Each structure stands twice: as C-alpha cells, then as structure tokens.
Amino acid sequence: MKCTILADNNCYIDQYYFAEPGASYSIEADGYNLLFDTGYSNVFMKNGLKLGVDFSTIDFVVLSHGHDDHTGGLKSLVSYFKRQGRRTPPLNPPRLLAHPDAFRYKEGFKGDPQGKELHRANLNEYFDIQLLKNPYYISENLVYLGEIPRINNYENQKPFGKMRTEYGFTDDYMMDDTAIVYRSKVGLVIITGCSHSGINNIVSAAKSHFPGDPIKCVLGGFHLLNPSAELLHKTLQSLKQENIDEVYAGHCTDLQSKIFLSKALNIKEMGVGLTLEFPDY
C-alpha cells in the first residue's frame, strides 16, 4: 500500500509543491488506485502530476465529507477527464464513494457557504456514483467506513453549521464525515479527511472491521482547531491506549494540538509530497 499527500495545509521545504487549506491523498492498494478527497482547488492535480500520479487510471474517488476544502477539486478532475475524452459510456468510469449528505449544500452559522451542493446530473457522465451510509469493502483489506458511529461523549457534541434538506435547513453534525482503513502486514493504516465525527470514533470504527490487528499509522486531519482542554485531554488519553506506531496529524490540526499530542504520541511531520508505503497483508 502506498499513500502520497497531494494537498495539505503544509508542504516541505525545498520540494516546491503547492499547499492550500484542504486535503487530498493518492492511494495505491491491492491493485486499485484511489483518490481520497480533492482539496479545495486544482492544487491536488498540479502536485499529483509533478509527483507522477496518473489520474487517468483512478478506480475510486472517495469523499471524506461534503465541505469545499475536500470536494472543490472535483471540477478540475472532471475537466481533466474531458480533455482525456474519458466519459461513460463507453469507458468504465471511476466509482465515486460518499455519504448521501456529502452532496447537500452546507453553510456556517453566519451564512458562509462551506459546501456546494454537488449535482449528480453533472457528475454521472464521469463517475459511477455510490452514495453509501454503510461500510464498503473496496478490497478484502481496504474499507470505506461509511457513517461513523458516535460512541463517546466528548467528540462531535455541537453542530458545525447548517445543512439544507428537502425540509429546509437543519443543524449539521457532519454525519457524512468518514474515513478509510487499510489492513497492512504491519498493522492498520487509518486515513481521515477532517475527523468531524471524532478521531477516536473513527479509530473505533476502523478497528471494528479488523479486530485484534494493531494500528500502524493514523494519518489526516483531526479537526483539533483551538479545542477545549477536555476534548484535547480525552483525545490524547484514548489515542495513547491504542499504541499507535506513527501519527501524521495534518490539515485541520493546529500547532498547539500537535504539541500536546506529541507528549504521548509519535507525531510525525506531514505535508505535500510525503509518501508512505506499507507492506501488503
């Protein structure tokens, strides 16, 4: 399994990639090529092409949730497919996996748009769209986690904004937030987008598919942005108990949270251009 960071808030010195407040990862596993999130703009594609990613071979596009900093690059991917002449039929399109709520319009409490409504009619020509609340096994060892069970009493306790439904606007608890897990030979690799559902809830969901396997790596956004002292302490306590080998906290994880987590976790630097490889199970 190979994971390459295409978009993140940070990039490494002297590597000359683009950074933006978004997330996108290229994942190669079990013979499949995945694009997990598309960042906010075309930055993921600029970086990906420079890193040698062949977007014409993508088998799956997985959206962690419906916010613009994770779905905004879809239009750039569609433009790329148009230039390549890749559309359906006759060519087999990549399968797009997302929670149904990821396609809804979202906004903050001040009315600021956070996620544009994604129109299936505009995407059906290029993707086989599968809107799923339940987990989906991409392969025997690679799982889209679907809707994350909220099992603790300290994560995701407040809405993140509003979401438009058929019945008007409602508080948005980001039920569309999801992640993926890969079972490698050295342990589980858990990859998140923003962890609006709670990083510890995500870890629990991932473990439920491969009980007894150790956790090798957790990578992605932890949504720890000026968190309360209680949330930060409980997050650390729970993650510490998992004996995780490596933690790459990026995107929506602020510096103070990384410093605090580093007291008990092996926090590693994360940025555009980082490539991690794990032996297949």
Image (spheres, rainbow, N blue to C red):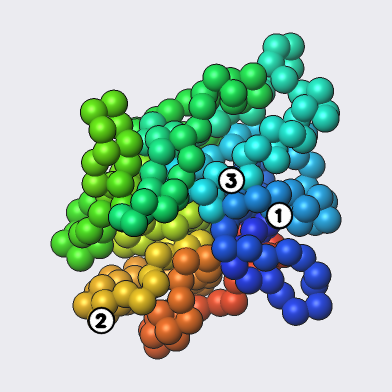
Residue 62: percent from the left, percent from the top?
Answer: 53, 40
Q: Which secondary structure lies at badge 2?
A: helix
Rendering coords of residue 27 (x, y %)? 63, 48
Residue marked by disc 1: 43
Toward the viewer: 277 or 187? 277
Residue at 44% x, 49% y is 113
Q: Secondary structure at mark 1?
A: helix
What residue do we see at 40% from left, 79% from top?
A: 257
Q: Is residue 238 above or below residue 256?
A: above
Answer left or right for 229 relative to 40.
Answer: left
Q: Quadrant of residue 145?
A: top left
Q: Earlier in the sequence, mark 2 or mark 1?
A: 1
Relative vertical location of residue 93 with respect to residue 264 in this rendering, above or below:
above
Disc assigned to residue 229: 2
Q: Circle 3 is placed at which residue position? A: 72
Residue 20, numbered circle: none
